[in-house]
Amino acid sequence: MKKLFKSKLFGVFCMILAVSATIAGVCLSHWFFSGTAALALAPLLSNLSREDIEALAVAKLSDNFGGSPYENMSGSPYENFAGDLDEDDVYDGSEDVHLSFIGSGNSFLTETDGAVEVSYSVTNLTPSIINVAFANGSLTDATILKNNFGADCYLKDGVMTSVGGKDVVGTGIGTVAGIDGFVKFSERNAYRITHMVIQAVNADGSVNTAAYNKTMIVQRFSPFRKFGEERINLFKYYSVQQQNKEKIEIPLIKYDIQRDDQTCIVMAVDPGVTLTVTETIGAIQNQAATLYKKSVMARENIAKKTAGLMPLRTLRAKRGAIASKAAAPKNPLQSIMDKLKK
């Protein structure tokens, strides 16, 4: 009788052990594999030791997956990325409400497409080389210009400076508000200069190629200090073999040059020379346009009756956070304090 009871007890124990091992095998197989393969391998895994399972994992599982959905996409734009892409990685400015593209382009990818140009000229009637600061209107103090930027005058409409009774004169070409207009505009609305064309002619109209043998200095600064300067050799963009010797073209897009209240561009103008400059305008951080875009967006949302509503994804995340907080086990000390309050 005792033997029969022990035999039955041992059988129940073995059954419980087998069921437990099978369940463990299923869990492990779901972790390593998926679907029907997991069910098929469950009995096998339940009979393996921990060392056997580790050896199987090392032999069969790859360690090359970095967690990116873009891996192993040969021939796609994502094939060279080791990890997932965030918003900074894919930013191109196209949906940035703070930026305006006034040409036919709508992002930094198409910034130069159908871009708008602004032109002006500087005529040096003096007998001296004049360093002109192509800067914003706040740099008007002659001493500050000379001591900090090596400039003799700043870009503006009309007479910029005089030497020996002779003037240096600035003139806007085809602009709505002249030189002063776009200089003041750039003080509050920074814009990129993607391309620059410079033409230099003498008083008799002949080309002055010596004017291209100069260095354009780009100085970035703040009211507190100066930052590093960039020196662009203009002669690098001139060749005696070029067909049109009247101008040089400088691809400023690769220098990330912008006109704003913290950038000063200084160029030297030879005596008796008229320098005509054409700037191609890229992205603009236009404050007025930003307000307009936001107001149009809000008005459309009001019409759709979506204004003021919380995005569904944000709402779900908020509800999930509240639920997780409610379900989280309380600190034992906090539980005691709660009981004492009651």
Image: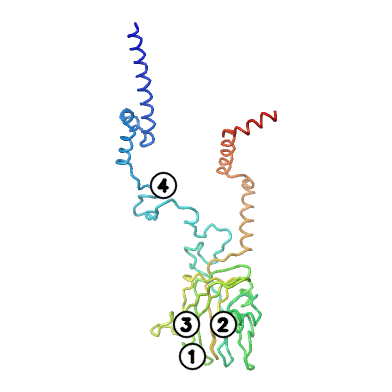
What residue type is disc 1 on?
A: Ser
Q: Where in the figure is residue 61, as x and y percent of width and height?
A: 33, 42
What is the spatial separation of the Cα atoms under label 3 and label 4, in whole angstroms? 53 Å
Residue position for label 3: 247
**Callout 2 touching callout 3 (CB < 8 Å):** no
In this view, 309 is above or below 292? above
**Callout 4 touching callout 2 (CB < 8 Å):** no
Q: Can residue 186 be seen in this view?
A: no
Which callout, 4 or 1, points at the residue further toward the start of the chain?
4
Say which element carries label 4.
loop
What residue type is disc 4 on?
A: Gly
Q: Residue at 61% across / 47% down in the picture? A: 304
Residue 257's label in the rendered image is none
Residue 121's label in the rendered image is 2
Residue position for label 4: 67
Residue position for label 1: 206
In this view, 102 is above or below 153? above
Q: Can residue 88 be seen in this view?
A: yes
Q: Residues within 10 Å of mark 1 (few under 14, many from 20)?
A: few
What residue type is disc 3 on?
A: Lys
